[in-house]
Image (tube, grey):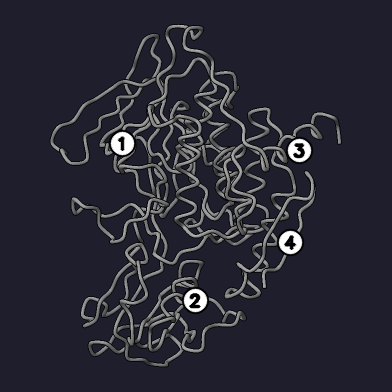
Amino acid sequence: MDNDSERFEANWLRFAIERERIIRIPPDVIAEGRKRIAVIGAGISGLCSLKHLLEKPQFSPVVFEQNSKVGGVWYYTRNAFNDDGTPSHSGVYENLMTNGPKELMMFPGFPHDQKRDSYLHHKQMFDYIEQFTDFHEMKTYIKFNTVTTNIRPVKGDNNQINWNVTYCERHSPDVTETEIFDGVIVCNGHYAKGIIPDIEGINHFTGDVIHSKEYRRPDVYKGKRVLIIGASFSGMDISFDVAKTAKQVYMSHRHEAYKTELPSNVLQRLNVRQIAEGNKVVFKDGSEANIDSIILCTGYSYDFPFLADDVMQVRNERLTPLYKHLVHIKYPNLLFVGIPKCVSYFIQAHEQARAAVAILEGHIQLPSEQEMLKDAEEDFRQKKNEFNLTELQAHYMGKGDLQWRLNEAHAKLCGFDKLPQVFADMQCSVQKSRSADFGAFRKINYFFKDSKSFGIQKIN
């Protein structure tokens, strides 16, 4: 390994254990004519993007955030609706703990309290995000309670594409304003619009049906027979949570039976075939059950209500035209951070945002439009052939080393070093422990030994 790579890995280890402030250029030495950049959303991806923008003297960023606080999905609301009756952006529930260790869920240069266990309660995560925002004095750049309603390309000087960003105050939707920007980074996440499956007979079900985004507390289901549809992380975690008070939980999914130990009142079933006779569920294996409530843990759809179809197309959860899951192919000054699903997303969002800002600087030579379109098709074809992924999984990075390949592609494009291998190794260990014993995987603490290795410690 060369000296530059060793230095890079050593710096990443330091970023994991030491706090470092943003290095800002003093305002009095910043040149006039800075590029105005709009950032949509102040969740993890938006804050990472803002941090990188603030480190560059040529940018003047503005973040548009629909909530009253930063954090995106980590901004917990006790109910599924905001005070004004609009749906909450967050699907965080009362007892939610992180599904990854804090060592992978940190902003580089701003580590968590080292005295805490690796797995944190959502309130601890939100407090950490707010501390990061305050530490770097970011809130002055964020327009809170502001809904972005429309983003349109317009021709500026020398036929350059600029962007009209139209927005409104959340409580005054009829009063809009429009500002012009030199570039846009979209960071509105992919956990806002729940997928509602088409299940025969569900419209006639006599009990209550919610999406996991609306789930908050297990006491609502005390003594009830509850059907959980879907068994990815949220389905599994909510099944464990609901089982604390429910009489019986049926966890229905399309996979082979999970080997992990489940609570005694949780039963696995194949997918639902239909809802019959009011509250009777018929599963695809022919078994039946009477239930009181249904929780749909069926995932989320990408949603960009502020982008017209002639700008961005979303078909079967595949976003086009998008290069490296990051750059709009027709409009390279429109970038998307946080599109990949099932990634170690704090460090990945940091690196994606870093690449997005580097591209906005104008120093990165992107391929031609045709070459980028060809690359996007080849990327999808390769994932389809290698991992048997469908179009619905075009941006899914939870198979093999896909998320680390993407990081390497961004690094190569922008002349960065890829993330140190220790992060991938730790992530692999986390995934194995989750699969082996879901009920106990959080009883492990992780720590970095050095820039190439990590250790674990079991909690009694």
Q: Are marks 3 and 1 in contact (CB under 8 Å)?
A: no
Which residue was labeled with disc 4? 456
Q: Residue placed at 54% from the left, 54% from the top? A: 396
Which residue was labeled with disc 1? 144
Which residue was labeled with disc 3? 9
Q: Position of residue 220 (x, y in %)?
A: 30, 76
Residue type at the position of mark 2: Arg
Choose top left, top right, bottom left or bottom right for residue 311: top left
Q: Earlier in the sequence, mark 2 or mark 3?
A: 3
Q: Position of residue 11 (x, y in %)?
A: 73, 34
Q: Residues under labels 4 and 2: Cα distance?
A: 33 Å
Residue type at the position of mark 3: Glu
Q: Residues under labels 3 and 1: Cα distance?
A: 36 Å
Closest to the camera, between mark 2 and mark 3, is: 3
Q: Earlier in the sequence, mark 1 or mark 4?
A: 1
Q: Residues within 10 Å of mark 1 (few under 14, many from 20)?
A: many
Q: Residue placed at 47% from the left, 85% from the top? A: 266
- Image quarter where the N terminus lies is top right
Q: Residue placed at 70% from the left, 52% from the top? A: 424
Q: Residue placed at 51% from the left, 30% from the top? A: 51
Q: Residue furthest left?
A: 174
Closest to the camera, between mark 1 and mark 2, is: 1
Which residue was labeled with disc 2? 254
- Image quarter where the C terminus lies is bottom right
Residue type at the position of mark 1: Phe
Q: Position of residue 413 (x, y in %)?
A: 64, 31
